[in-house]
Image (cartoon, rainbow, N blue to C red):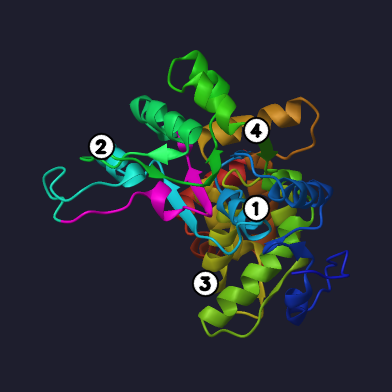
Amino acid sequence: MTSNITHLSSQTEPHLAEHFAGRFGMLGQSPAMQALFEQIEVVAKAQGPVMISGESGTGKELVAQALHQQSERAEGPFVVVNCAGIPGELLEAEFFGHTRGAFTGASEARPGMLQQANGGSLFLDEISDMPISLQAKLLRALQDGAVRPVGRNQEDHVNVRIIAATHDNLRKKIARGEFRKDLFYRLDTFQIQIPALRERGDDKLLLARNFLDTYCREQDKPVLGLSEEARQLLLDYHFPGNVRELQNLIERAVAFCDSDQIETAHLLPGIRQSQTPVSAHADEQALLTGSGMPTMHELQSRYLKMVLSEVNDNKQRAAEILGIGRRTLYRWLQQGK
């Protein structure tokens, strides 16, 4: 999706969402995303393995899909494996396939993920969760270009590009003996680091507008807008869950919105629930180090005042909107003094 639009102002109309700037199915016009798009374009033309790093919720699978779709392998299969979602005892059979009767429950022969991805790309999501015993077998398969299904002596030759992804620090896992160094260097031919949402500036509003349009259609609601205060809240909040958290936040806000625009009151409960003691402490530390990021207490106090203003200081109504009891409301008011 491409566009000449370069700025999302507070007056952006909902119907302009389809023109938002982006590439490879991803929205973003921040410098960080433009650099990512350029990197995808270069790496897609190569043949070597790729290691994608990024926090949870940043869109690692979208980047993997873009690498495949822009490559010479685009006509081949794109197979996704969540290494954290397959029981350890089944991983070998899932990766390399198995013959009929190879183990209890194997009623028929089945090709593994590597065979299924032959001629295309295999995306190994959360590869840091792969058991170290399987890592050795994967390394050998990559080196030999061949796999041996469970229960069979004959090998199948495969031609697959591996795209791996992780939110962990693999070098630390290597130091702890939890990840093979030789496999890491085999997969780390090309590295792509996806920026966190907090590093993407006004992309938050770009994405929010897109999610608004999507969920208004899904929930059969009039197309909503974002109030100035709601936009500022999104810009101020650091989104530890990244794009996925923003998406969930907007979906919830649309569901509970009973007016023609999203207000801070519709966003605050989701932000409040996602805030953990660890992330709150991180915000405080960021403020102390001069980064300018507001603490959760500051956000809470600022938007509590806005909610009270919207309901003419009706504390019972404010508590209902925020999903808290009156005693909690009064405690928040005391903390904000």
Q: CA distance from mark 1 to mark 2?
A: 34 Å
Q: In the picture provided, is 286 more to the left or to the right than 101?
A: right
Q: Tag 1's secondary structure?
A: helix
Q: Amino acid at mark 3?
A: Phe
Residue 247: % across, % down: 58, 61
Q: Is residue 198 above or below residue 135?
A: below
The reply to whether callout 3 and callout 4 are in contact (CB within 8 Å) is no
Query: Residue 256 bears which disc, if any?
Result: 3
* CA gap, disc 1 and disc 3: 37 Å
Camera-near label (3 vs 4) is: 4
Image mark for residue 67: 1
Residue under label 2, please give it: 153
Marks counted in the figure total 4
* Pointer 1 local density, CA inside 10 Å: few below 14, some 14–19, many at least 20: many
**Disc 1 vs disc 2: which is toward the camera?**
2
- Kindly identify which residue carries mark 4: 189
Inspect the image, locate mark 4, and give the three-letter code of the amino acid beneath it: Thr
Q: Residues within 10 Å of mark 2 (few under 14, many from 20)?
A: few
Q: Is-magenta flag for residue 110?
A: yes
| Membership of 251 in magenta stretch | no
Q: Dividing the picture into quarters, in which one does residue 51 lie?
A: top right
Of residues 125 and 29, the one drawn nearer to the viewer in this rendering: 125
User: Could you classify mark 3 by the number of other residues whose Cα lies within 10 Å: few (under 14), some (14-19), or many (20 or more)?
Assistant: some
**Do the residues under discs 1 and 2 have CB atoms within 8 angstroms?**
no
Q: Secondary structure at mark 3?
A: helix
CA–CA distance between discs 3 and 4? 47 Å
**Residue 311 visible:** no
What is the quadrant of residue 206 in the picture?
A: bottom right
